[in-house]
């Protein structure tokens, strides 16, 4: 790895260059593109490495190298990632994978995936509309509809694609999409594809949502409110009862993305509707992914038969994309069966999440608004320090990933702990204790992005 001299070891010129590049890193890709000449030089036109966006990315990497922060991303795991994992020949306590109920790697799930592969092969080799339909697709959709307590469900080959294609297809330029500011990228991309007007409300602020509805509703045809059942960054969840009342009052559709709440919220893991005891049919669009609790890969929409029928006949991400691979459909189906049979897994996950949250509070860590379920952030407030902290914890055999700018605001840079039903109390306590110690050491060292920019002023 390049230069590990630390900030103090930089020459004046190097430090200026570094600070400039970090400041450049605060520009969005659009801003960088807008600042660049419209038509590149002829010789550069075919060389991607001359694109300003790519130069900016490389500068950021070089800056991290200069201050000795190893890249914490793209580390390959060599085992099933659950409460433990293996990276580069070493074993770690793992808090970086959303294998919430320990079903990825479960023998029944593996057996179901293998059996489906034996019967149908690894690919269905066509869109379901044409030659790609297999019985297991409808069995899975029936199980998903049953879990959510609604009429039907339809699956896509990715969770991200499920949001993009559904929202991009259902909404159009005359419509309005209202999103929590922390909403997942797939919903934001769906809104862009729809060409609808999109307005954000501050995280969890339903008063602000109501003001937006009151002042904008009359100017649009359809209105969609999109929230997460449990927020993937902050680990809290919205007031579903009030959301339903608002969408009814303002004649809007409600989409709830249950990626991180299925298998997590509610006594038997059926998600936020069960948590609040509301009728699932009072939400128009339930969305979820198969990649978390359900130990597979893919996404789905659950709701009325009419909605699912329409999306299956017309949504581009479904019609023009291959049907879900047999082993993946089978793995998700087997996972729904275990989820229904073993609610004690959901209870263990909840106990573990609450344990982590309490231990973190006792250790003086800032866990933001997390409710202590599947996602608990530890807010560091500085991207460089968050990356340093994650790297330091690897030395303690703990694997947890930083979430840094621009994925979150710089002051909200954090480590994000994914909690599972399979973690032990001892693993949780050790992780919290080591995080608190290492963070205190890093802060005492005065390094990090804020310190660097302050010194340069
Ligand atoms: N929605 C949310 C809230 C997510 O966190 C994610 C990804 N983690 C997705 C949708 C996309 O799902 P997938 O990764 O299964 O494509």
Image (spheres, grey):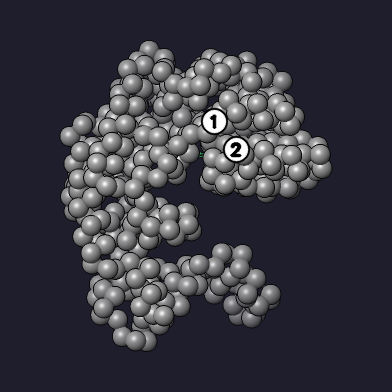
For mark 2, does the 10 Å Cα neighbourhood hold few (<14), some (14 to 19), or many (20 or more) residues? some
Residue 228 vs residue 45: left or right? left
Q: Is residue 347 above or below residue 234?
A: above
Residue 455's spot in the image, x, y percent? Answer: 35, 78
Residue 286's spot in the image, x, y percent? Answer: 59, 27
Check contact, mark 2 vs mark 1: CB within 8 A.
yes
Residue 131 visible within the image = no
Secondary structure beneath label 1: loop
Q: Is residue 315 above or below residue 212?
A: above
The quadrant in which residue 303 appears is: top right
Badge 2 or badge 1: first in the primary sequence: 2
Residue lying furthest top: 341
Q: Quadrant of the C terminus?
A: bottom left
Q: CA distance from mark 2 to mark 1?
A: 8 Å
**Tally of marks:** 2
Residue 252 vs residue 370: left or right? right
Q: Residue at x 23, y 45 (%)?
A: 363
Residue 310 visible within the image = yes
Residue identified by numbered label 2:
206
Q: Nearer the viewer, residue 113 or 4?
A: 4
Secondary structure beneath label 2: helix
Residue identified by numbered label 1:
239
The quadrant in which residue 451 appears is: bottom left
Residue 143's spot in the image, x, y percent? Answer: 51, 16
Residue 396 vs residue 282: left or right? left
Q: Quadrant of the N terminus?
A: bottom left
The quadrant in which residue 42 appears is: bottom right
Q: Residue at x 42, y 77 (%)?
A: 19
For mark 1, does the 10 Å Cα neighbourhood hold few (<14), some (14 to 19), or many (20 or more) residues? few
Q: Nearer the viewer, residue 283 or 53?
A: 283
């Amino acid at each position: 790895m390049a230069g590990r001299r630390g900030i103090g070891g930089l020459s004046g010129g190097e430090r200026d260059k570094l600070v400039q590049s970090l400041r450049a890193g605060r520009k969005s890709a659009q801003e960088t593109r807008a600042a660049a000449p419209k038509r590149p030089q002829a010789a550069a036109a075919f060389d991607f490495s001359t694109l300003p966006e790519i130069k900016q990315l490389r500068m950021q990497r070089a800056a991290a190298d200069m201050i000795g922060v190893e890249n914490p991303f793209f580390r390959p795991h060599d085992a099933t990632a659950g409460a433990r994992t293996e990276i580069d020949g070493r074993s770690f306590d793992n808090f970086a994978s959303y294998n919430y109920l320990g079903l990825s790697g479960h023998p029944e799930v593996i057996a179901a995936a293998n059996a489906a592969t034996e019967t149908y092969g690894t690919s269905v080799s066509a869109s379901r509309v044409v030659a790609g339909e297999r019985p297991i697709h409808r069995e899975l959709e029936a199980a998903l509809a049953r879990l959510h307590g609604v009429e039907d469900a339809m699956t896509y080959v990715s969770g991200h694609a499920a949001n993009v294609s559904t929202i991009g297809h259902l909404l159009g330029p005359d419509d309005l999409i209202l999103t929590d500011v922390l909403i997942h990228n797939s919903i934001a991309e769906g809104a862009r594809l729809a060409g609808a007007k999109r307005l954000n409300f501050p995280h969890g602020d339903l008063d602000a949502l109501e003001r937006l509805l009151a002042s904008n509703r009359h100017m649009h045809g359809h209105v969609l409110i999109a929230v997460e059942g449990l927020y993937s960054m902050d680990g809290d969840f919205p007031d579903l009862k009030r959301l339903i009342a608002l969408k009814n009052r303002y004649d809007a559709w409600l989409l709830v993305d249950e990626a991180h709440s299925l298998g997590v919220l509610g006594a038997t893991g059926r998600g936020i509707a069960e948590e609040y005891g509301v009728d699932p049919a009072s939400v128009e669009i339930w969305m979820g992914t198969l990649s978390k609790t359900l130990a597979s890969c893919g996404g789905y929409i659950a709701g009325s038969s009419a909605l699912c029928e329409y999306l299956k006949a017309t949504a581009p991400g479904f019609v023009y994309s291959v049907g879900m691979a047999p082993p993946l459909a089978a793995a998700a189906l087997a996972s729904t069966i275990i989820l229904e049979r073993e609610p004690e897994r959901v209870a263990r996950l909840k106990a573990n999440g609450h344990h982590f949250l309490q231990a973190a509070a006792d250790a003086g860590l800032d866990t933001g608004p997390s409710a202590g379920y599947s996602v608990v952030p530890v807010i560091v407030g500085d991207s460089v320090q968050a990356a340093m902290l994650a790297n330091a914890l690897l030395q303690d055999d703990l694997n947890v990933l930083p979430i840094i700018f621009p994925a979150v605001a710089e002051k909200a840079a954090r480590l994000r702990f994914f909690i599972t039903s399979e973690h032990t109390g001892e693993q949780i306590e050790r992780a919290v204790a080591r995080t608190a110690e290492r963070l205190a050491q890093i802060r005492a060292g005065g390094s990090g992005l804020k310190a660097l920019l302050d010194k340069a002023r």
